[in-house]
Amino acid sequence: MYFESFAAFWHMAGHGSFVWSAYGMSFVVLGLLVLQPLVRYRRELGRIKNSAVAVLQQNATPSSADSAQVEK
Amino acid sequence: MTHPAAMQADNESMFRILHAIFKRDLRVYFRTRGAWLNPLIFVLLVITLFTLGIGPDAKQLASNATAIIWVVALLGIMLSLDALFRSDYEDGTLEQLLLSPRPLYFAIMGKVAAHWLVTGLPMLLASPLFALMLGIPISIVPLLALGLFLGSGILSFVGAIGAAVTVSLQTGGLLIALIILPLYVPVIIFGAGLLQYALEGWSVAAPLMMLSGLLCAAVVLAPLAIGAGLKISMDS
Amino acid sequence: MANWQWFHRLGSPKWLLATLDRWLPWLLSLGLLMLVGALAWGLAFVPPDYKQGNSFRIMYIHVPTAVVALAAYYAMAIAGAVAMIWRMKVADMVMRAIAPVGAALTFLALVTGAIWGKPTWGAYWVWQDARLTSMLILFFLYLGVMALYDAYSDRRNGNRAAAVVALAGTVNIPIIYKSVDWWSSLHQPASIKFTEQSAIASEMLQPLLLAIIGTYFVFAAMVILQLRLQIVLSEGRSNWLAEYATNKLR
């Protein structure tokens, strides 16, 4: 460890604002790069699942006209 | 195996299609005054705007002149590129060209070369006027003319790539600008560098050779990309 | 003869999605582990540079993002070329997946480079640095590719057009870099050297190498995240995907 204390680590001998703003920006951007596609992917997958379930339900319930014809 | 006589005929047809398209496009351009006149007027107008913006201080203008002339010429040519393939796309000529058995590569080369001549030659001829307006010394003018002529060739060929992939879109010139302006960076660097070196009295060999080299590369390679782009646009 | 089955299997979005789901957690955790480890190493366990002081530590995030951003552009162009030559839908999806990640990394390289520039050169932006200026142009190249495929309503043709432009860009990148390099030497006073860097000490280099490798892994993970999204967006109406979604979100 080349810093005597955490305060010194934070201060970076005067360059702290530069170092930490650069790293902070990087973490924000990288974080967004991970989160944005993840959230959108899950949302799209959920949407597809919902529409698939809706289609299945539609096919499962027979219409009254059909059942009347079958009985005949 | 191709018979030697047939190979001879192939070579002839390569240049024949190039020549045919070249002459046809030139004829069309000369009939429509706007094709060659508008970029020229654009350049003169924008130079005037720059002069008005910078102010009457001749020294300020002179120090930026080398950049201004190149940026303005670049923008003028870029604006004229949108129309390069559009009229042919709309009236079906492009489709005919793509379907014909003649080599597309040379047809494209002829077409873009015609555009280069029509936009570059007026700039070359008007360069003394540009020099006068921007305070560029007369001794530099021949180099300016040569640089503009070579540069406009590169700008036409590289820019045609952007024109080819956007011809089926309705977005207009801004998308072309976004695509090709990064590709234009070397032209402006060596073109303005050419003028700056000449003004400082240094040897202009390096930027001049780079411009010539880029022109050769553009003429040979760009038609490949342009052809691919036109086929894609035709499919849309 | 080589067994090309893996290559053709790669082209099946269904197989790919399942495989990507399996690989993703490993790649992401491994990459983050390496990257965060390397950054911590570089931030705290490396002596300060005698010329630049502590601000040189920005290098550990600036250089990896710059390197990967440039490599990503080539990967994107190659993916586009593969899509055109072998008519592979998946390769097109890979190209679209890499583009936003590469653009974001380029942006990051620019911002961290500018922040690093202030204590080092006294200014946030110095045009004479050929690498930084070339990186700015790389950013515009990315934006152009993305704007182009967004402009097309037909997805497939938009991908082909973007691939053509991306390939034209790859040819130009070395030219652009060399021209900016030449340009930056035009009016440079001899005493100040912006682009020359003294030989880097090995103890400073090691965390940098680890950071670069870690960034590559993280990049791969982020591309996979985008790729999954592209597969779903592209294959939205197919049956296998409906089945997959139902099974996945049980």
Image (cartoon, rainbow, N blue to C red):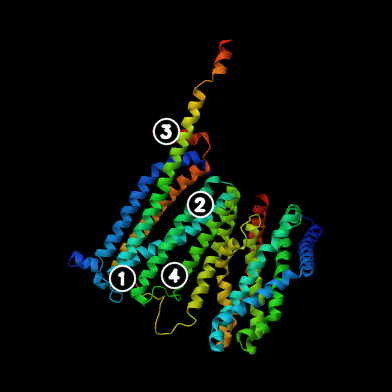
Q: Which residue is mark 1?
A: C55
The amino acid type of the residue labelled 4 equals Leu
| Label 4 crowd (10 A; few <14 / some 14-19 / many >=20) | many
| Label 3 crowd (10 A; few <14 / some 14-19 / many >=20) | few
Q: Quadrant of residue C212?
A: bottom left
Distance (Cα) linking label 1 and label 2: 35 Å
Reading the chain from its start, which is encountered first: label 1 or label 4? 1
Reading the chain from its start, which is encountered first: label 3 or label 1? 1
Find residue C29 and report its horizontal and vertical position in percent: 33, 49
Chain ID, mark 4? C
Distance (Cα) linking label 3 and label 1: 50 Å
The amino acid type of the residue labelled 2 equals Arg
Q: Secondary structure at mark 1?
A: helix
Label for residue B33? none
Q: Same subunit under labels 2 and 3? A: yes
Q: Quadrant of residue C46?
A: bottom left
Left or right of C163 on screen, residue C244: left
Distance (Cα) linking label 1 and label 4: 17 Å
Left or right of C103 on screen, residue B234: right
Q: Which residue is mark 2?
A: C96
Q: Secondary structure at mark 2?
A: helix
Q: Same subunit under labels 1 and 4? A: yes
The amino acid type of the residue labelled 3 equals Asn
Label for residue C247? 3
Residue A37 can be seen in this image = yes
Of residue A43 and residue B201, the one placed in the foreground of this image is: A43
Kindly indicate whether the residue at mark 3 contacts the one at mark 2 (C-beta within 8 angstroms). Answer: no
Chain ID, mark 3? C
